[in-house]
Amino acid sequence: MRGDPWSSDGRRRRISDLPVQRNYFEKHFGSSLAVLDAKFEIASGYSPSSTRRAREAALRAFLSQHVPGALCVGSGHALYDDGPSKQQDILVFDRDSMAMPLGDISLCLHEGVRAAIEVKSILTKEDIETTARIFESLRMPQPLKVLVAWQLQDAHPHRDRDPEH
């Protein structure tokens, strides 16, 4: 059957096993990432706070459009028995778990948190250390922890991206 997600040997098919679908995925996500990159570029040149908020919002919107329907994307804190985690730029959590909105952030029961993402415009060594401390506040169950940076601190924005140069 053409739409069957299972291969003839009983394993679930992967995108890489489906050459036609793979082309559509590559085109879609390649183009979507180009749009996200453009949104990050548009956010440049404003106050650091405005730039940060615009980039976080762009990534949250991208993720909201692409995560499975059983998940939600927001910002806020994971709530543990002894109190909340540190504030996370982006939280991905189960749609059916408890989330208490607090303005533009949420307080999510830790059991439902699947991923935490920190967004940095320019990644520095200090940012890595700070992000590690923020992620330490997320305890069991361990969600996926991701640091997204638009540019490295000492990277020249116009440097050729060819690794040979």
Image (tube, grey):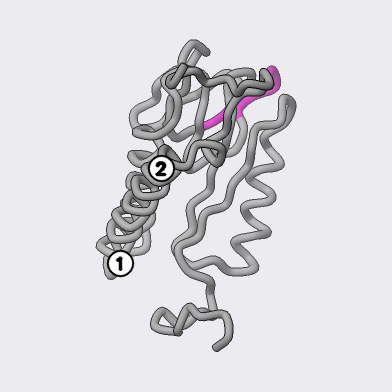
Is 21 displayed left or right of 127 in the figure? left
Tag 1 residue: 44
Instruction: Give the quadrant of residue 64.
Output: top left
Chain part drawn in magenta:
77-84
Residue 58 against residue 165 in the figure, above or below: above
The residue at which mark 2 appears reads as 25
* Residue at the farthest right position: 140
Left or right relative to 139: residue 154? left
> What residue appears at the point 38 percent right and 53 percent down from the top-left corner?
30
Q: Which amino acid, by three-letter code, is at mark 1? A: Ser
Where 146 falls versus 79 (above or below)? below
Whole-percent x and y of residue 117?
Answer: 53, 43
Camera-near label (1 vs 2) is 2
Residue 144 position, x and y percent, is: 64, 37
Residue at the spot 58% in from the left edge and 20% down from the top edge = 6
The residue under the point 55% across, 88% down is 165
| Residue type highlighted by circle 2 | Phe
Callout 1: SS: loop
